[in-house]
Image (cartoon, helix red, strand yellow):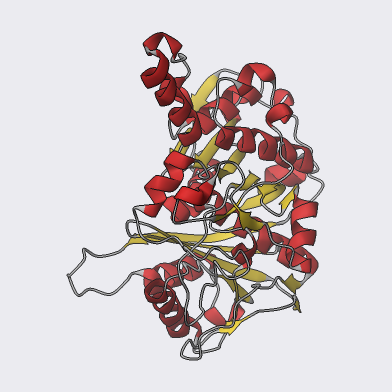
C-alpha cells in the first residue's frame, strides 16, 4: 500500500511499524434494538430485544418467521443519489459510519486522504437489491435492469462507497468469512495502521432479511424455525433450535494511539490488543477444532493470561453441536466456569459480518461502564461448564474482553480488547 505525505498529499511508501497500538475512538451502531451506540447500549442493559415476526415481507410461506429487523430506520438518512445506487446493507454502513466519525470527532476532509483507510466485512452482500433487479429482468426485460446492479450486490460495495463518500484513498478491502469476517476486518485494520495508515473505518453491516436471502440461509439448516420471538434463539440451552438472522451491525474508527492522542480524540474506548484466526479441519478428518488454539493465540498476542480476561463475548451459534464445541474450548482455556460469558446477540439475532463488530462495540462499552451485559431468554444446559451472565447486567470492573466469532464454512476468529493503559 501507499500513504500520503501530509505536506503534499502525494503517495509515499508505507513503513511497517509493529509497535503501533490500535485504539478505537469512535463507535457507530445500527442494530435491531437501537440506532446509535447510546440507544443500543441502553437497550442491551435493560434487556430490550429487537426480535420479532418478519415484517419486511410476508414470511408465512417460509419455515423461518422471526428475525432481528432494524426498526425505525429509514434510508432517507442516505442522500437520494446514493440511495438508488446501493443496497440496504450499504445504507446501514453509511449511517453507522457517520455516527462513528462524529463520535470520534473526525473530519476526513482535514486529513491526508492516502492515510485514511476503509476495511469492512460482508457475508451476503446486496441481496435485496439483486433480487429486485432479477425480478425486473424476468418480468420486464433487460432494459429495466439498472447499471448499478453490477456493483450494488457485490461484497466490496460498502467499502468502496464509504471510501468514495469520505475521500479515503488509503488501504481498502473487504473480508468475507461470515460471522468471523467482522473480527478479521479489525485484524486487517490494525495491520493497515502498522503499514502507515493514520485512521481506519472498519466493521461490518448486513441486511439478510429479504426473500432471496432468507431462502439461501434456510438451505443451510442452521436457522431456528420457532415462530415465537421469545424462544426462537436460545444459544447454550439444552433444546436450542438454531439461530435467528438479524440485520445491521457496527462501524468503528480505529487509529494508532499516538495519532489519536496527538489530534485530541475525545475518547479512547479501548485497544485492539490481540487477534488470531484459524480454520476447521476437513469433515471426517478426526482433527479437533482450532478454536482453543485461536483463542490462546489472541491472548498471547495481547500478552494476557486467561485469568486476566474479565468476560467472553461468545459466538453463540445456537445449535447443540456448535454450542458444545464452543463451551468445551472455553473450559479448556479458562477452566470450567472460570470466566464470565455473555451473548447479547440473543437480543438482535446473528448479524453475520455485522455481528462480531457489534460484539466488539458492546465489549468496549462494557469496559467503559464496568458492567457485563446479559444474555436474555436463556437457561443454559446443565452439562455446559459455563458461567453465562443471564437475566440482568453484572457489575464488574471489566478491563479486558475476548470476542469469539465462528463463521459457516469453518472460520474461527478471536479478538482481545482492553482498556487503554499508558
Which part of the image, by quadrant, shows the N terminus? top left
On screen, residue 41 above or below 30: below
Q: Residue furthest top?
A: 143
Question: Which quadrant of the structure image shows residue 324?
Answer: bottom left
Question: Which quadrant of the structure image shows residue 220?
Answer: bottom left
Query: Which residue appears at 75% of the width and 75% of the height?
Result: 393
Which part of the image, by quadrant, shows the C terminus? bottom right
Query: Which residue appears at 72% of the width and 56% of the height?
Result: 269
Question: Which quadrant of the structure image shows residue 231?
Answer: bottom right
Residue 97: x and y, percent? 67, 37
Report the side of 341 relative to 414 (left or right).
Answer: right
Q: From where the camera sits, is residue 4 visible?
A: no
Report the side of 221 relative to 164 (left or right).
Answer: left
The number of discs equals 0
Q: Nearest the camera: 15 or 408?
A: 408
Residue 22: x and y, percent? 61, 51
Q: From where the camera sits, is residue 108 visible?
A: yes
Q: Nearest the camera: 204 or 334?
A: 204
Q: Nearest the camera: 73 or 177?
A: 73
Residue 218: x and y, percent? 39, 53
On screen, residue 257 above or below 414: above
Amino acid at each position: 500500500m501507499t500513504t500520503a505525505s501530509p505536506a503534499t498529499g502525494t503517495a509515499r511508501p508505507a513503513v511497517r511499524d509493529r509497535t503501533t497500538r490500535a485504539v478505537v475512538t469512535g463507535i457507530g451502531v445500527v442494530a435491531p434494538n437501537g440506532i446509535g451506540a447510546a440507544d443500543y447500549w441502553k437497550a442491551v442493559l435493560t434487556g430490550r430485544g429487537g426480535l420479532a415476526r418478519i415484517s419486511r415481507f410476508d414470511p408465512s410461506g417460509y419455515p423461518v418467521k422471526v428475525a432481528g429487523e432494524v426498526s425505525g430506520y429509514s434510508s432517507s438518512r442516505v442522500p437520494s443519489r446514493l440511495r438508488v445506487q446501493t443496497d440496504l446493507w450499504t445504507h446501514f454502513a453509511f449511517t453507522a459510519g457517520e455516527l462513528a466519525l462524529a463520535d470520534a470527532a473526525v473530519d476526513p476532509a482535514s486529513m491526508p486522504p492516502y492515510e485514511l483507510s476503509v476495511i469492512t466485512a460482508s457475508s451476503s452482500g446486496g441481496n435485496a437489491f439483486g433480487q429486485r433487479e432479477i425480478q425486473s429482468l424476468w418480468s420486464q426485460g433487460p432494459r429495466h435492469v439498472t447499471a448499478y446492479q453490477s456493483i450494488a450486490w457485490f461484497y466490496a460495495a460498502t467499502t468502496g462507497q464509504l471510501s468514495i463518500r469520505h475521500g479515503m484513498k488509503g488501504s481498502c478491502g473487504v473480508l468475507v468469512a461470515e460471522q468471523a469476517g467482522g473480527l478479521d476486518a479489525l485484524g486487517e485494520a490494525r495491520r493497515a495502521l502498522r503499514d502507515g495508515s493514520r485512521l481506519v473505518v472498519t466493521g461490518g453491516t448486513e441486511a439478510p432479511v429479504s426473500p432471496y436471502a432468507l431462502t439461501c440461509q434456510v438451505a443451510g439448516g442452521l436457522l431456528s424455525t420457532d415462530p415465537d420471538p421469545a424462544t426462537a434463539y436460545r444459544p447454550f440451552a439444552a433444546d436450542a433450535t438454531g439461530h435467528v438472522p438479524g440485520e445491521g451491525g457496527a462501524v468503528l474508527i480505529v487509529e494508532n494511539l499516538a495519532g489519536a492522542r496527538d489530534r485530541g480524540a475525545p475518547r479512547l474506548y479501548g485497544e485492539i490488543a490481540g487477534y488470531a484466526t484459524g480454520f476447521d479441519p476437513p469433515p471426517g478428518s478426526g482433527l479437533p477444532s482450532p478454536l482453543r488454539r485461536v483463542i490462546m493465540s489472541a491472548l498471547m498476542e495481547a500478552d494476557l493470561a486467561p485469568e486476566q480476561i474479565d468476560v467472553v463475548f461468545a459466538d453463540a451459534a445456537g445449535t447443540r453441536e456448535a454450542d458444545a464445541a464452543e463451551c468445551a474450548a472455553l473450559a479448556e482455556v479458562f477452566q470450567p466456569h472460570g470466566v464470565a460469558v455473555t451473548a447479547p446477540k440473543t437480543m438482535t439475532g446473528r448479524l453475520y459480518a455485522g455481528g462480531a463488530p457489534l460484539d466488539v462495540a458492546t465489549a468496549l462499552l462494557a469496559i467503559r461502564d464496568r458492567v457485563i451485559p446479559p444474555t436474555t431468554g436463556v437457561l443454559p444446559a446443565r452439562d455446559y461448564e459455563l458461567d453465562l451472565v443471564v437475566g440482568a447486567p453484572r457489575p464488574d470492573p471489566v478491563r479486558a474482553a475476548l470476542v469469539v466469532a465462528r463463521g459457516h464454512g469453518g472460520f474461527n476468529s478471536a479478538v482481545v480488547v482492553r482498556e487503554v493503559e499508558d
